[in-house]
Amino acid sequence: MSETPDRKPTIAPAEGPCLQRRAFLRGCAGAASLLGAPAAVARLAAKDVRSLTFVNTHTAERLHATYWERGRYLDDALAEINHVLRDHRSNEVRAIDPQLLDLLHQVQGRLRVTKPFHVISGYRSPATNARLRKASSGVAKRSLHMEGKAIDVRLPGVVLKDLRKAALDLRAGGVGYYPRPEFVHLDTGRVRHW
């Protein structure tokens, strides 16, 4: 490798004071608009990536997954989510409706939290649903849990009524409120609540 003698930096010819000032002012205006609207910038960034964190209360499994990015759902992340939200009683896995994930993501956005969802129930096999139905009158015969379209969750640190209200405000499916066992049911079925 040969050494080259030190050279003086070359300076590009000036565009003229008027053009330089306009470019400078345009740059300042753009930066000011970004600084003045951090919420708008965060919303733009959030549109490019959707992530969720889950803690399965029965298996203690924890998962943080970016499941949507650059306009598409990510198959590997969806598979990981399906596994964590499986029927823990039978170990059966079923695809979780991506719209349910979007609903959870929107609920978090409305509440302005990124805490992990504690999952009480995700997918339920028909056999598990039938057993639970025999033990409790609160289990639907045609539960959307059996289709991967329902989830029972809580958000530690978030008042259960606030979680329920955020879901109701979205008007995106069913919302069930269970204060004694401390969870909210969310599904992607028709808009209703109980």
Image (spheres, grey):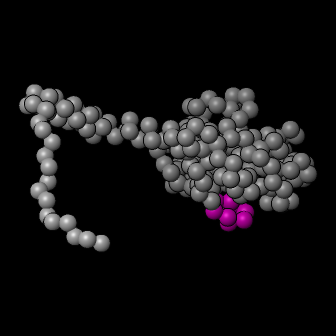
Outermost residue on the bottom side: it is: 1
Segment tinted magenta in the rendering: 55-62
The quadrant in which residue 12 appears is top left
Residue 29 lies, in percent from the top left, at 22, 32
Residue 157 lies, in percent from the top left, at 51, 55
Residue at left offset 9%, top offset 30%: 16
Q: Which of the pair 174/2 is nearer the observer?
A: 2
Q: Main secondary structure of the magenta part?
A: loop
Does residue 170 belong to the magenta stretch? no
Does residue 58 belong to the magenta stretch? yes
Q: Which of the pair 82/122 is nearer the observer?
A: 82
Question: Which quadrant of the rendered structure holds the C terminus?
Answer: top right
Asked if residue 37 lies left or right of residue 73, the reply is left
Residue at left offset 20%, top offset 66%: 4
* 4 up-or-down from 116: above or below: below
Residue 119 lies, in percent from the top left, at 67, 54
Question: Which quadrant of the rendered structure holds the N terminus?
Answer: bottom left
